[in-house]
Image: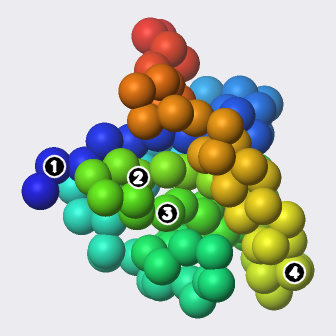
Amino acid sequence: MEYSLFSTAFFKTQFDSLPIDERRKIRDRLLLAKANPFRNKAIHSNRFKRLFRIRLDVQGVSIRLVYAVLGSKIVVAGFIPRDNDYRDLDSLLSKMQRELETQTEAGFSLEPPDSKHEKA
């Protein structure tokens, strides 16, 4: 199955605030997840059945990049610090769920996270 990669507005805000070398690192890991979204560790959630995380170090901080597999779509929710032991996960998933509920299937227009940043 071929997967499409999308991001929430919250993740785009986080992503845009990073230096280009960190964005490339995240983009590369997301492209690996796009090839096989089940390669990373699953996270238990009552909101989403297929929820996964990628462990990364970004600007010297250990983070978890959280994404959900929804059919053939991979939706990147955002990243949370690892030192919080998933305490911020519920808030992150609430933001993602609200954003997904406001999208209609015909108007599902979340852009891939690497759509316009890697021109250089």
Q: Amino acid at mark 3?
A: Ala
Which residue is the site of mark 1? 2
Q: Secondary structure at mark 3?
A: strand
Which residue is the site of mark 3? 68
Q: Earlier in the sequence, mark 4 or mark 3?
A: 3
Q: Earlier in the sequence, mark 2 or mark 1?
A: 1
Q: Report the residue at 44% width, 75% height from top.
A: 50
Classed neighbour count for the residue bearing mark 2: other residues with Cα under 10 Å, few (<14), some (14–19), many (≥20) = many
Frontmost residue, 27 versus 20: 27
Nearest to the eye among marks 4 and 3: give it: 3
Q: Secondary structure at mark 4?
A: loop
For the residues labelled 2 and 1, say whether their Cβ atoms are less than 8 Å apart: no
Distance between mark 2 and mark 1 Cα atoms = 10 Å
For the residues labelled 2 and 3, say whether their Cβ atoms are less than 8 Å apart: yes
Which residue is the site of mark 2? 74
Q: Secondary structure at mark 1?
A: loop
Query: Residue 106: percent from the left, percent from the top?
Result: 40, 27
Distance between mark 4 and mark 3 Cα atoms = 18 Å
Q: Amino acid at mark 2?
A: Ile
Which residue is the site of mark 4? 87
User: Furthest-top residue in view?
Assistant: 119
Classed neighbour count for the residue bearing mark 3: other residues with Cα under 10 Å, few (<14), some (14–19), many (≥20) = many
